[in-house]
Image (cartoon, helix red, strand yellow):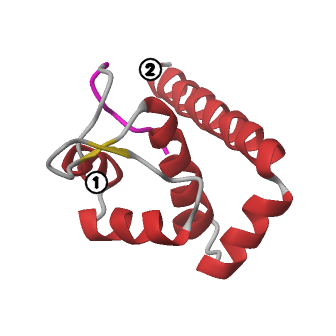
Amino acid sequence: MNVELPEKRYYSIGEVADAFNVNPSLIRFWETEFSILNPKKNAKGNRRFTTQDIENVKHLYFLLKERGYTIEGARTYIKEHKKKSLNTLGIINKLKEIRSRLIKIKEQL
């Protein structure tokens, strides 16, 4: 999944939800279910997502939406493959980018 977000230090939950095309309530739910997703909160209680939090949301989105894991299955997968799975997700994203570039080049020919 290619997420389009401007380069900044913190993102609001609305910006993250729009980038992933999901409701903010889903991200709040994932926050309660997965310990890897723990955004900082300001004095008002608004969530502020860092780039690391965005990577964790990408990972959860990939497991739950693209691979079809259940909540419990994704939780188990993350525990068993903590470091390995984040690297795998990065590789998959890079390969998807390369594929889309190659398709664009093919269309131009």
- Residue 53: x and y in percent read 47, 41
Distance, label 2 to label 1, CA atoms, is 33 Å
| Nearer to us: label 2 or label 1 | 1
- Per the image, the residue denoted by label 2 is 108
Q: Residue at x 28, y 54 (%)?
A: 17
Q: Position of residue 6 (x, y in %)?
A: 27, 24
* Residues packed near mark 1 inside 10 Å, few (<14), some (14 to 19) or many (20 plus): some
Name the residue type under label 1: Ala
Residue 95 location, quadrant: top right
Q: Which mark is residue 17?
A: 1
Q: Look at the picture and state if 90 lies above or below 81.
A: above
Residue at 21% in and 52% down: 45
**Alpha-carbon neighbours of circle 2 within 10 Å: few (<14), some, or many (≥20)?**
few
Residue extent of the magenta highlight:
1-7
> Magenta includes 5?
yes
- Type of amino acid at the residue the image marks with label 2: Gln
Q: Residue at x 47, y 26 (%)?
A: 104
Quick one: SS at disc 2?
Answer: helix
Q: Dominant secondary structure of the magenta stretch? A: loop
